Amino acid sequence: MRFIGASLILLPWVLSKAKWRENILPTLPRATIISLFYAIFFIGFFEALNTTNATNTATIFTLVPLITGLLAVIAFREKLTGKQLLVYAVGAIGTIWVIFGGQLTLLMSFTLNKGDLVFMGTIFSMSFYSIAMKMLYRNDEMIVLAFCTLVGGSFWMALALLITGQPFEWQRLQHDAIFHMTYLILGATLATVYLYQITTVALGPKRVSAYIYLNPALIILLLLIIEGTPIPNTIIPGIIMSVIATVILQRDKRLPADKTR
């Protein structure tokens, strides 16, 4: 529903210009491939949450920058130095530190279950999404590429529901769920897909994925601003490590950005 909703919102804008309308059909095949990896990530994520929890998935998600970096080495023949590996490790440690609130006992008790193994495979799809985005980009109009990606994602997710025999159950969208779905459509899908794609083209998969290290710290900051939740002193070292790793990866000249915009 979130992908269909975002597609319908973009549709009038895409159809408003002849140039954009003409680019839909040439762009759609490549966008459908890109969206396949994005859809697999979401399907695997929700399947994993049936048998695991958000803390475990957030911890495993910290591997995305490193996996993306390794795939970029294969796909684009980029080099991955020992310094970069060290920075990836520091960023992951700092992010995990924030996730577990600086409590070593909770981290030591972390174990993998069936859902974690599912999500472990799923994060490869997220990395492939970034790689495919750069490989299949052909100086497309970004609004058209985002629209086609959303259409493709809607197709793949609907196909998954039909194959597994799961009902759509759209009638359950009532009351507060309507508000939450509106945010998912506008913020977590429409804006995210557009911004993620435009930055991946401009900066490259490695640099974009490095910002994942800031996710937990930004959530803590938002909770402070919105709800007044104080930042525990125990997680400050983790935040510092995550920020330093992200800044170093953004400034590393060995991580080439894509100049074909």
Image (cartoon, grey):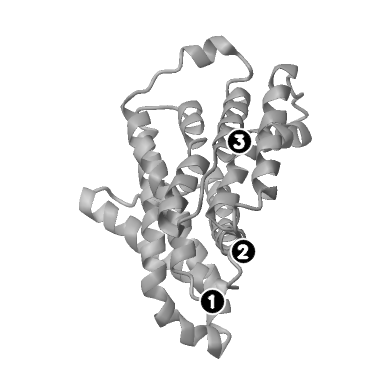
Nearest to viewer (mark 3 / mark 2): 3
Which residue bears the numbered disc 2?
Answer: 202
Describe the element under mark 2 as helix, strand or loop: helix
Residue farthest to the top? 105
**Which mark, by number, is residue 87?**
3
Whole-percent x, y for residue 179 in the image? 58, 49
Question: 9 or 117, which lies in front?
Answer: 117
Quadrant position of residue 111: top left
Nearest to viewer (mark 3 / mark 1): 3
Which of the two labelled residues, at mark 3 and mark 1, occupies the earlier sequence position?
Answer: 3
Q: How far separated are the C-alphas under marks 1 and 2?
A: 11 Å
Question: 48 or 109, which lies in front?
Answer: 109
- Amino acid type, mark 3: Val
Badge 1: residue crowd in 10 Å (few <14, some 14–19, many ≥20): few
- Amino acid type, mark 1: Asn
Question: Which quarter of the image is occupied by the C terminus?
Answer: bottom right
Quadrant position of residue 240: top right
At a point 56% along the width and 59% down the height, the residue shown is: 200
Q: Would residue 61 be found to the left or right of residue 249 on screen?
A: left
Q: Would residue 215 be found to the left or right of residue 124 on screen?
A: right
At a point 41% along the width and 62% down the height, the residue shown is: 34
